[in-house]
Structures are given as C-alpha cells and as structure tokens.
Image (cartoon, grey):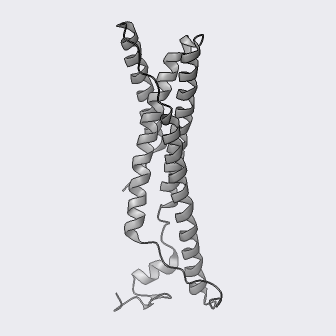
Amino acid sequence: MKATKPWVLVVTTAVSVALAYTVLRLWDHFGDSIPPVPLSAPITLAVLAVAVFGVALGLRSRLNAYRKARARIASGEPRDPRERPVKPVDPLQAARALVLAKASGLVGAVFGGIYGGYGLFLLGKLDIAADRAQALRCLLAFIAGVALVAAALFLERILKVPPEQPAERSVASGGVNPLRGTGAGHG
C-alpha cells in the first residue's frame, strides 16, 4: 500500500471547502435557514485526532523497542535481566493501524473542509451573535480536522517499513540471521 500524499489531502480539503461554501450559498439564496453546526463536530474530530495520535505514539515506542532489541542481538550484546522481552508488532495490528491512518486522513480532510467552507460562508454574518458562535465552532472543527489529518500522516509515517539493512540482505541471500540462526532451512 502506498503512503498517502499530503497534497492529496490538501486538495481534498480545498474541494470540500469549495463545495460546502457553494452549497451553503445556494441554500441561503433560496431562503431556507441553514442548519446549525453541532457542538459535537469539533469535539468529535478532536477526540479522533487524539486517538489516532495515541495509536501512533504507542506503535512508535513498540517499534523502536523492537528495533533496539534486534540491533542489540545483532551486535552480540547480552540482554539485561531486568529488561522485559520485546515482542514484535503483530502484522495484522499494523495493517489495521494503517487502514485507520488512511481513513482518518480522508475523514479529517473532508470534514475539516466542510466546516472550513461553512465558516467561510459565515464570515459575512459575524455581526449576528448566533452566527458568530457558529463560525467559532466551524473554526474549531476545521482546526480539529487538520489535526486529524496530521495525526493520520504521522501514524502512516510511523508504520513505514524501513529499507533493508545490509545484515538483512545477507539473510535473504542465505547468510546468517542473528535472530534465527542460518538463513537457509529455517522458516
């Protein structure tokens, strides 16, 4: 699976802003009252951003611990008896986290863009107290959407598989893997 390009999320946000602004202008033009921005919009996006960021930090610490343990074993250093054994990250868990990152990036871009367009529409109506409160909610939802996109991109970056190192390449060609013994015949 390829990494999400940040410019794709920026374009998605920009298109969402333009569509939301256009729809709200048409809605207002036909005389209907526009729907209010729910208070839960910025809260939900912010909670999602914090959750995705938390998953990213947890996986980063586990992956770093596993990489350090592998490097220690490869260099022949003995394990400290007080040190907890490090388990590798389950590939299925990593795949689920990657799907979470991809989906969260798109959700943050689309909903951040929708509320950004809504806020842009309300800029001309800031003299009314109710619209000012709605504009503030839109601003907070937009910021939370951007934070969700940033957290998603961070999680994807954490899950990026590093390039093979020389010791690993020798294993693939039949060399010795310090974690498993010889590369041939063990699997």
* Relative height, residue 106 to residue 112 (above, below): below
21 vs 70, left or right, is left
The front one of 8 and 104 is 104
Q: Quarter of the image for the C terminus: give it.
A: bottom left
Residue at the spot x=48%, y=87% of the render?
179
Q: Is residue 158 visible?
A: yes
Residue 184 on image: x %, y %: 36, 90
Residue nearer the viewer, 130 or 176: 130
* Left or right: residue 83 compared with residue 87: right
> Which residue is pictured at 53% across the width and 70% down the height?
63
| Image: 53 above or below 95 | above
- Quarter of the picture containing the N terminus is bottom left
Image quadrant where residue 31 sits: top left
Horizontal side of 31 relative to 130 (left or right) equals left
- In depth, the one of 45 and 187 nearer the eye is 45
Q: Position of residue 30 (x, y in %)?
A: 34, 7
Q: Residue at x 55, y 17 (%)?
A: 130
- Percent x, y of residue 144: 54, 38
